[in-house]
Image (tube, coloured by chain):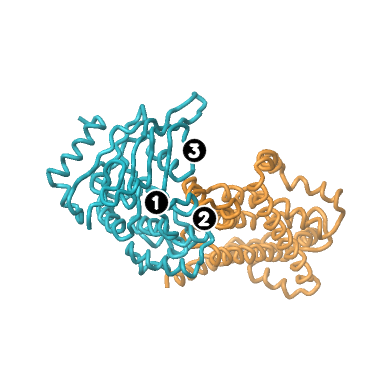
Amino acid sequence: MLNLKKIAIAVIAHAAFVGFWWFYVWAAEVPAYILPTPWQTLQTLAVSEYNWMRHFTATAITIFAGYTLAVVVGVSAAVLFTWSKTLDEMAMPLLVTINMIPKVAMAPLFIVWLRFGLHTNIIITFTICFFPILLNTARGLREVEPDLLDLVRSLHGSRWQVFKKIQLPGSLPYIFSGMKVATVLAVAGAIVGEFIQSSRGLGWFMLVTQEALNTDAMVMALLLVTLIGVILYGIVIALEKYFVVEDARLD
Amino acid sequence: MTDPAGSGLAHPETGAPPFIELDRVRKVYQTREGEVEAIRDVTMTVNSGELVSIVGPSGCGKSTLLKILAGLHEHDEGTVRIGTDRDPFDRQRDVGMVFQQPLLLKWRRILENVLLPAEILGLNLKEARGRARDLLELVGLSDYAESYPYQLSGGMQQRAAIARALIHDPKLVLMDEPFGALDAMTRDRLNIELMRIWRESGKTILFVTHGIQEAVFLGSHVAVMTARPARLAEYIEVDLPERANLSIRTTPEFGAYTRKIYHLLDFD
């Protein structure tokens, strides 16, 4: 019941936001090329020349592929670091520095290195969401109670047993915490990539429609990008609910 | 139930050699400031099936002593002998540990938490499962086998930790301030519980604590340790009648023991 109430409040909040938007445009008599009404925005979906499906799919593929790649590589790298102390000591400080590089600024270089294409945007998306996942996972793997280690050691448990039974399951909340942060970054990464180089995708579409001042289509594209992000976030939350015990979840 | 308190070198009834024999054990830690003596001159014997309390202030080396017995630390001087010819001690399988924090794995149900040592030792899990249920009954948690740790109170989590320490049927159970983080009443209740669990399981238990009353109530011997220098001040045999409830703490005999320990620890 409590859940239903929470959902109801969330729905109301969203409806109120749309209502306010609508009211503002109407009351302030904002011209449609500055800000269309929600209804005008929604109507653009019927315009077949806009090719919504094509752009939506391109952006969705970029986001999901880049994000998934970041999760796989990020978690694997963190696991590798916990197994090799030397690697950890060498790589971690370097990675912290590399993390400081504004990933967005690397996009033009990626185009030089990887040429035009969807794959380049996938790599840009990957680069931008890789670090929070890696760093969070590494932190989670490190957080083991010393006494718990003693307990396993007193039973002559192996390093592998510590990893499998304690470290890895213990790091899951941290992995999900990193994954949640990375969802927002993945969406941003994909759009930046499309702004810089592409011939399709919602980011590219926004640039094109901007030239014609089709603001309603631009706003619609923005809403669709957000929708992809929300879907991704929803999947991550659902996975977290399934894999992580309620009490252990991190925000 | 006879008082299994041992005195001296041999078991008073069976004449068997003691299960644990420590002779002038010394342990030194190397730190940046130089050598720090963690314990010195620890000499004591513990008979099989005995519960011995180790009491003393912080930094007196109580935990160090437990870690040496658990095989986690090497001692530097003296001898440590555990087990006898007739009652051999397997370093891997015969140690159970309970800490100040329950340290249950959040993502495992209570039953699965209890099973952890059995998994690590590679025991038959089907048998261990049955044993885990028995142990949960012993510690009064039968109804919580399928609960997650966060659904249990601190005292209940510590009971689960005790069940976990017993799952592989170790001969020696080492407890490092197991009730130190609990409120006074829960602690009292668990003292009585531990007394019962010890009697029913027949384990040799070493129980480290800050609490003098707790030490006297539980121990058939109390090892009193002092800090700076960290050494064993006295190894006291506690000769008290049936200790089924806490009212014994109000008797003059009990008071005499606590007074003696307070004195040894310079509280007067």
Q: Nearer the viewer, mark 3 or mark 2?
A: 3
| Left-right relation of B82 to A53 | left
Residue A184 vs B60, above or below: the answer is below
Image spot of residue B15 (x, y percent): 30, 48
- Please tell me which residue lies in front, B189 or A70: B189
Q: Where is B127 relative to B156, above or below?
A: below
- Local SS, label 1: strand
Q: Chain of mark 3?
A: B
Q: Tag 3 or tag 1, which sits nearer the N-term?
A: 3
Q: Is label 3 in contact with label 2 (beta carbons under 8 Å)?
A: no
Depth check, mark 1 against mark 2: the one in front is: 1
Q: Secondary structure at mark 2?
A: loop
Place of residue A206 in the rendered image (x, y in percent of width and height, measured from the top left) = 76, 60
- Asked if badges 1 and 2 are on one and the same chain, I answer no
- Identify the colour of chain B in the image: cyan
* Three-letter code for the amino acid on which mark 1 is drawn: Leu
The residue sitting at 41% across, 42% down in the picture is B66
Chain A: drawing colour = orange
**The N terminus of chain A is located in which quarter?**
bottom left
From the viewer's perspective, is residue B212 above or below residue A35? above
CA neighbours of label 3 inside 10 A, class few (<14), some (14 to 19), many (20+): some
Q: Quadrant of residue A99?
A: top right
Question: Do tags 3 and 2 sit on the same chain?
Answer: no
Q: Which residue is mark 3?
A: B74
- Can you tell which quarter of the image residue A101 is in? top right
Number of the label disc, if any, that sits on residue B146: none
